[in-house]
Image (cartoon, helix red, strand yellow):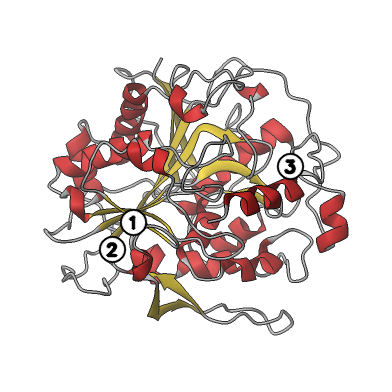
């Protein structure tokens, strides 16, 4: 990839000016005819004491009891064991314990990161040991188990030798020789995931980390990201530099169900890095987006399909085909290749980005003028995006229309939709559990 060309593109985007909510206006309006505007009523939020709705210390109280409005989902009936093949049949996503509907676990440790937001790469300021504890606590709380191995066994009760596990990361700003601080995935929580998978018998070589973004910019796996991987046999896949020969499936495609009055989209194939795995872990970053308002778990799968750039006219607020009646994100995430394979979503809020999706992380006023130092865990892709969206809203104001896709996804049966206040009154439908590990 031509590094100079990539920087010039970002400078063009950033040159439009970043307003106080962190979204770009001005020049982008003149060029593409729309832009996301912050709410005029965006609150001025002062730093808060970290005082969650539900506080549980590491040794302490039982997991959160669901409110009267929440009923446990029925445990799915396991489907037949998958035989590994070039096109993996979506594996069952049942767990060995009944899971609470709309359950989101949020682990927090104030010393997970230590960056001064000025010097060096932020990825060098992560405490890997603390982050590993946060991951272990998140999966055990979610599955209501007591050990790391038990948690992963509960998430993968039907795992068979030879089956592949995929981890979808977010590397939209990456270059092979990445040397900037533009927000991207971090390896530390992934190392903790891999440690847990190994304990239940998943071989390193059966774990794939991928981002096959193909659109406005090609997917790249940065060297500094790979070098921090603690497991040398783990495999990587991207569009340009790691197993590009995998390409995109000729069979497994998303069919977009656009309404009659909205321009149709062509069927777009999934990358074979996704199609070939039997189970999937989605790892978005908690961040704003210059077009869509927010970029969380649903949008992370833009890096799982071919030509995702075609979708911006449907997902960017104010674009030609943006609508409260339709979002292609629902078709993508409702497809069996994603819906039936995904065992877990982990939201990376160690730094996040309350400003946009293309700049360096900045301090969060709502987390004491430092990094959020948080990770989010859920089996419900709608509920976890709602919670992360609420933290972004509290920090930098609401972006009208940013959550339309979540309303539509809930209506399509993909999960629990609710917008609430994770700092205070919490939720009625989502079972939100926050764990302080300090």
The residue identified by callout 3 is 398
The image shows residue 229 at horizontal and vertical percentages of: 30, 39
Q: Residues within 10 Å of mark 3 (few under 14, many from 20)?
A: many
The image shows residue 164 at horizontal and vertical percentages of: 23, 59
Q: Is residue 117 left or right of residue 253?
A: right
Sequence-first disc among 3 and 1: 1
Q: Residue at the spot x=20%, y=73% of the render?
A: 85
- Given residues 309 and 159, the one toward you in this image is 309
Secondary structure of residue under mark 3: loop
Where is 128 relative to 9, above or below? above
- Observer-side mark, 3 or 1, equals 1
Q: Residue at the spot x=73%, y=67% of the render?
A: 323
Separation of residues labelled 1 and 2 (CA atoms): 7 Å
The residue identified by callout 1 is 280
Label 1 close to label 2 by CB (< 8 Å): yes
Q: Residues within 10 Å of mark 2 (few under 14, many from 20)?
A: many
Quarter placement of the C terminus: top left
Q: Residue at the spot x=34%, y=33% of the render?
A: 135
Separation of residues labelled 3 and 1 (CA atoms): 31 Å
Secondary structure of residue under mark 1: strand
Where is 415 relative to 395, above or below? below
Sequence-first disc among 3 and 2: 2
Q: Is residue 151 visible?
A: no
The residue identified by callout 2 is 277
- Given residues 196 and 99, the one toward you in this image is 196
């Amino acid at each position: 990839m031509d590094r100079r060309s990539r920087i010039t593109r970002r400078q063009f985007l950033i040159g439009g000016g970043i307003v106080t909510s962190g979204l770009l206006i001005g020049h982008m309006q003149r060029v593409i005819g729309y832009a996301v505007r912050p709410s005029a009523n965006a609150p001025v939020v002062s730093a808060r004491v970290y005082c969650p709705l539900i506080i549980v210390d590491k040794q302490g109280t039982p997991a959160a009891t669901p409110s009267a409005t929440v009923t446990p989902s029925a445990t799915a009936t396991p489907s037949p064991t998958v035989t590994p093949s070039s096109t993996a049949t979506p594996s069952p996503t049942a767990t060995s314990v009944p899971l609470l509907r709309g359950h989101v676990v949020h682990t927090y440790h104030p010393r997970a990161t230590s960056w001064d937001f000025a010097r060096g790469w932020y990825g060098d300021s992560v405490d890997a040991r603390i982050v590993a504890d946060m991951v272990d606590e998140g999966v055990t709380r979610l599955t209501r188990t007591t050990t790391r191995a038990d948690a992963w066994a509960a998430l993968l009760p039907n795992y068979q030798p030879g089956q592949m596990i995929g981890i979808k990361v977010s590397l939209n700003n990456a270059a092979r020789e990445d040397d900037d601080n533009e927000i991207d995935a971090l390896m530390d929580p992934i190392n903790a995931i891999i440690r847990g998978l190994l304990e239940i018998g998943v071989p390193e070589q059966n774990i794939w980390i991928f981002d096959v973004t193909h659109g406005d910019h090609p997917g790249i796996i940065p060297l500094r990201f790979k070098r921090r991987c603690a497991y040398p046999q783990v495999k990587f896949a991207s569009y340009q530099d790691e197993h590009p020969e995998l390409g995109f499936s000729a069979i497994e495609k998303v069919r977009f169900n656009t309404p009659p009055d909205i321009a149709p989209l062509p069927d777009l194939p999934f990358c074979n890095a996704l199609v070939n795995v039997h189970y999937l872990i989605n790892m978005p970053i908690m961040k704003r987006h210059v077009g869509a308002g927010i970029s969380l778990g649903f949008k992370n799968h833009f890096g799982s399909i071919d030509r995702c750039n075609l979708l911006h006219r449907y997902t960017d607020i104010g674009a030609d085909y943006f609508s409260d009646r339709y979002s292609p994100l629902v078709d993508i995430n409702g497809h069996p290749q994603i819906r039936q394979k995904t065992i877990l979503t982990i939201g990376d809020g160690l730094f996040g980005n309350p400003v946009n999706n293309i700049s360096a992380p900045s301090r969060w006023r709502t987390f004491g003028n430092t990094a959020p130092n948080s990770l989010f865990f859920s089996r419900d892709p709608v509920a976890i995006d709602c919670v992360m969206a609420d933290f972004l809203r509290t920090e930098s104001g609401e972006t009208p229309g940013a959550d339309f896709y979540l309303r539509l996804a809930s209506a399509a049966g993909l999960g629990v939709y609710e917008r609430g206040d994770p700092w205070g009154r919490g939720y009625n439908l989502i079972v939100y559990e926050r764990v302080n590990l300090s």
